[in-house]
Image: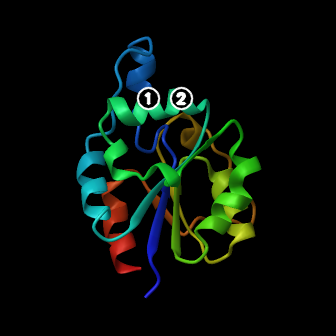
């Protein structure tokens, strides 16, 4: 049986970016369901980060919210541009059953074009998801509004 790998974006997926902005970048918090979901998924899958931004800034979010413990350092992929790192990151995990959880539909679309067997899970919260225009000819495998929904998806896939 292929190992399951779940690649998570950070902002608007795990990390509550709205609270962070409202508190002038002082309060680091994750969505309510995140701890429970990561705990459950860590028992059935390898968890990884695929995020855009400044590396130390993004890692600080993982540390301050106490979710870093769910991720191995070798499975944290943060870059200025996700699209530039998409190929090597997707290739690294192509041996397994790969799930990509992101709030940006364009990243899911590009990942699916590169590796058709990747399971794309669109996290429909946050400013990107709310303002996202449909991509003609593309529909993610799953659309969720809470990470709670992905536990059964990954468990049953």
- The numbered dot on residue 110 is none
Answer with left or right where residue 136 lies relative to residue 152: right
Query: Quadrant of the image for the C terminus?
Result: bottom left
- Asked if 151 appears above or below 23 in the picture, the reply is below
Which quadrant would residue 52 be assigned to in this image? top right
- Give the residue at x 38% y 68%: 45
Decide if residue 15 is on the left or right side of residue 99: left
Mark 1 burial class by Cα count in 10 Å: few <14, some 14-19, many 20+: few
Give coordinates of residue 82: x percent, y percent.
68, 46
The residue identified by callout 2 is 56
Residue 69 percent location from the top left of the image: 32, 47
x%, y% of residue 46?
41, 65
Q: Is residue 31 left or right of residue 1?
A: left
Q: Which residue is mark 1?
A: 60
Q: CA distance from mark 2 to mark 1?
A: 6 Å
Q: Position of residue 55 (x, y in %)?
A: 58, 33
Of the pair 147 and 90, the residue shown nearer to us: 90
């Amino acid at each position: 049986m292929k190992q399951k790998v779940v690649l998570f974006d950070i902002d608007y997926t795990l990390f509550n970016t709205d609270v962070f902005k409202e508190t002038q970048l002082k309060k680091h918090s994750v969505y309510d369901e995140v701890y429970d979901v990561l705990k459950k998924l860590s028992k059935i899958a390898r968890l990884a980060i695929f995020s855009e931004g400044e590396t130390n800034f993004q890692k600080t979010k993982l540390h301050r919210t106490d979710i870093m413990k769910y991720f191995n350092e070798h499975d944290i992929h943060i870059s200025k541009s996700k699209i530039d790192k998409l190929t090597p990151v997707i290739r690294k995990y192509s041996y397994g059953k790969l799930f990509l959880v992101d709030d940006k539909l364009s990243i899911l679309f590009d990942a699916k074009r590169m590796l058709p067997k990747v399971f794309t899970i669109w996290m429909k919260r946050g400013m990107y998801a709310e303002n996202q225009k449909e991509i003609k000819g593309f529909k993610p495998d799953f659309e969720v509004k809470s990470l709670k929904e992905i536990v059964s998806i990954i468990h049953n896939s």
